């Protein structure tokens, strides 16, 4: 890949990271607005109003929606005909470093066995990249997630006895929500994975978290469980931000896979009210389409550093 194309590739990805850090994806924003409109508690309504104001200012001032811009994770589906397959890893890493400097993002990549912060959001094994191969395609599809500290805290994975069934799944999810949900700045998105063991159910829960709100699982029983859990989690009254209100969740998404007859693995991944995730397709000619966002931050460099005192 020549230098000019590589720079274009890095710029496309770093611009995508910038958008994701500043503007919520359309599905999360839409659901947030729906909860705000239907909230009955005056305290909760005031909190929603402030969170909305925060989103507005983030967009106007081109600053991240939340100070914790998380650790960046990429879930990449790469077509076997994509011409720059060998460059993907280096480009994603360089794009993270560039976005960290230019947006700027909070440096969050700390050595797993110490407190040394690399200062760039890149480090040993970071950014996290997971690949899927797509035969017959020449596109690169990237789903990106900014994994914040608070919103990652409720993450759990456990293997239940199969007889515990859907009641056991609900109990585990609700106990986790009540114990740790408030740390994650609710209303929350629950991604739930159901599979054989701790690792597959955890991975499925992350896939569920990445799926747009308003969609249902393809498995009819899982789709029913999504609705039941959403209603029951709303009744916990923990949102927004733990102050109590009519709703506690933005959504519950479940992904499942056939499991071992002797186990029922359940994974939980959570996203906060400021769930920042994005979905972009980069074609073989490096043109791109953002599939997750309908609103984009200003591009002006000056605006990034504008004084906010009078706004
Ligand atoms: S949980 Fe979300 S909104 Fe709260 S501090 Fe973390 S990233 Fe920010």
Image: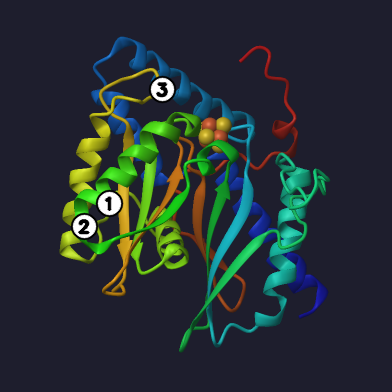
Quadrant of the image occupied by residue 179 = top left
- Mark 1 crowdedness (10 Å alpha carbons): few <14, some 14-19, many ≥20: many
User: Can residue 9 be seen?
Assistant: yes
- Is the C-beta separation of discs 2 and 1 under 8 Å? yes
Depth check, front residue: 190 or 284: 190
Q: Residue at x 69, y 39 (%)?
A: 300
Q: CA distance from mark 2 to mark 1?
A: 6 Å
* Mark 2, residue position: 165
Q: Nearer the viewer, mark 1 or mark 3?
A: 1
* Mark 3, residue position: 242
Quadrant of the image occupied by residue 257 = bottom left
Q: Under 8 Å from ligand 1: the CB of mark 1?
A: no
Q: Ligand 1 quadrant?
A: top right
* Mark 1, residue position: 169
Of the numbered discs 1 and 3, the one sitting upstream in the chain is 1
Q: Is residue 296 above or below residue 194?
A: above
Q: Residue at x 50, y 54 (%)?
A: 278
Q: CA distance from mark 2 to mark 3?
A: 29 Å
- Mark 2 crowdedness (10 Å alpha carbons): few <14, some 14-19, many ≥20: few
Say what secondary structure mark 2 lies in.
helix
Q: In the rendering, at what x and y percent does residue 263 appear?
A: 32, 67
């Amino acid at each position: 890949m020549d230098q000019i194309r590589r720079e274009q590739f890095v710029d496309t990805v770093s611009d995508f990271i910038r958008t994701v850090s500043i503007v919520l994806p359309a599905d999360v924003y839409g659901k947030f607005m729906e909860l705000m409109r239907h909230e009955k508690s005056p305290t909760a309504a005031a909190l929603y109003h402030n969170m909305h104001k925060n989103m507005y200012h983030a967009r106007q001032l081109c600053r991240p929606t939340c100070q914790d811009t998380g650790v960046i994770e990429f879930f990449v589906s790469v077509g076997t005909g994509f011409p720059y397959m060998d460059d993907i890893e280096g480009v994603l890493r360089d794009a993270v470093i560039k976005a960290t400097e230019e947006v700027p993002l909070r440096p969050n990549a700390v050595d797993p066995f110490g407190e040394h912060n690399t200062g760039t959001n890149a480090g040993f094994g970071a950014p996290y990249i997971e690949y899927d191969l797509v035969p017959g395609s020449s596109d690169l599809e990237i789903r990106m997630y900014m994994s914040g500290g608070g919103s990652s805290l409720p993450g759990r994975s456990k293997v239940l006895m199969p007889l515990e069934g859907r009641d056991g799944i609900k109990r585990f999810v609700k106990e986790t929500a009540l114990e740790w949900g408030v740390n994650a700045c609710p209303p929350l998105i629950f991604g739930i994975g159901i599979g054989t063991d701790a690792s597959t159910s955890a991975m499925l829960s992350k896939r569920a978290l990445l799926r747009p709100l308003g969609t249902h699982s393809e498995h009819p029983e899982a789709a029913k469980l999504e609705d039941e859990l959403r209603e029951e989690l709303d009744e916990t009254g923990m949102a927004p931000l733990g102050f109590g209100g009519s709703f506690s969740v933005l959504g519950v998404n479940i992904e499942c896979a056939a499991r071992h007859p002797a186990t029922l693995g359940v994974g939980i991944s959570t996203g906060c009210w400021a769930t920042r995730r994005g979905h972009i397709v980069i074609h073989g000619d490096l043109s791109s389409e953002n599939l997750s966002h309908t609103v984009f931050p200003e591009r002006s460099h000056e605006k990034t550093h504008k004084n906010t005192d009078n706004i």
